[in-house]
Amino acid sequence: MFAPVTVLNATTVNGLAGDIGTVLADGGWEIREEGSYGEQDVAVTTVFYTAGDAQQEQAAATLQAQFPDIQGGPSERFFEVEGVPDPGLVVIATGNWQP
């Protein structure tokens, strides 16, 4: 089960969201958006899904199984992605995975 993915960079590593997005796309995932995440409330690279969306929750588990460097989640998304009304799954990159 797949779902579109938004990748957000929570580090000062330039281009990390794009690098991870490329790896995910090479693995068959549609990348919806890449950007930055300004908060510091995520400890490890984590996949989030929309609360109440069982298909996204299943897809998040599939994504995490495929890419074990996504150490956190699957977790319900507790934040909005500015300018992206339907972000799909959201991977927040914290720097523990630098492909």
Image: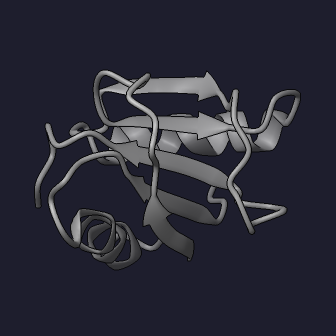
Horizontal side of 39 relative to 93 (left or right) equals: right
Horizontal side of 32 relative to 61 (left or right) equals: right
Residue that sits furthest to the right in the current view: 52
> Measuring 46% from the left and 49% from the top, which residue is drawn there?
37
Residue 46, how many percent across, how many down?
41, 33
Q: Total label count? A: 0
> Measuring 62% from the left and 59% from the top, which residue is drawn there?
2
Quadrant of the image containing the C terminus: bottom left
Q: 82 or 44: nearer the eye? A: 82
Q: Is residue 30 visible?
A: no
- What's the coloring here? one colour
Q: 80 or 70: nearer the eye? A: 80
Q: 55 or 13: nearer the eye? A: 13
> Measuring 84% from the left and 62% from the top, which residue is drawn there?
85
Residue 65, how many percent across, how many down?
37, 37
Residue 31, how many percent across, how many down?
53, 74
Where residue 55 sits, quadrant-wise, is: top right
* Residue 87 position (above or below residue 18): above
Horizontal side of 18 relative to 36 (left or right) equals: left
> Measuring 75% from the left and 66% from the top, which residue is drawn there?
84
Q: Is residue 28 visible?
A: yes
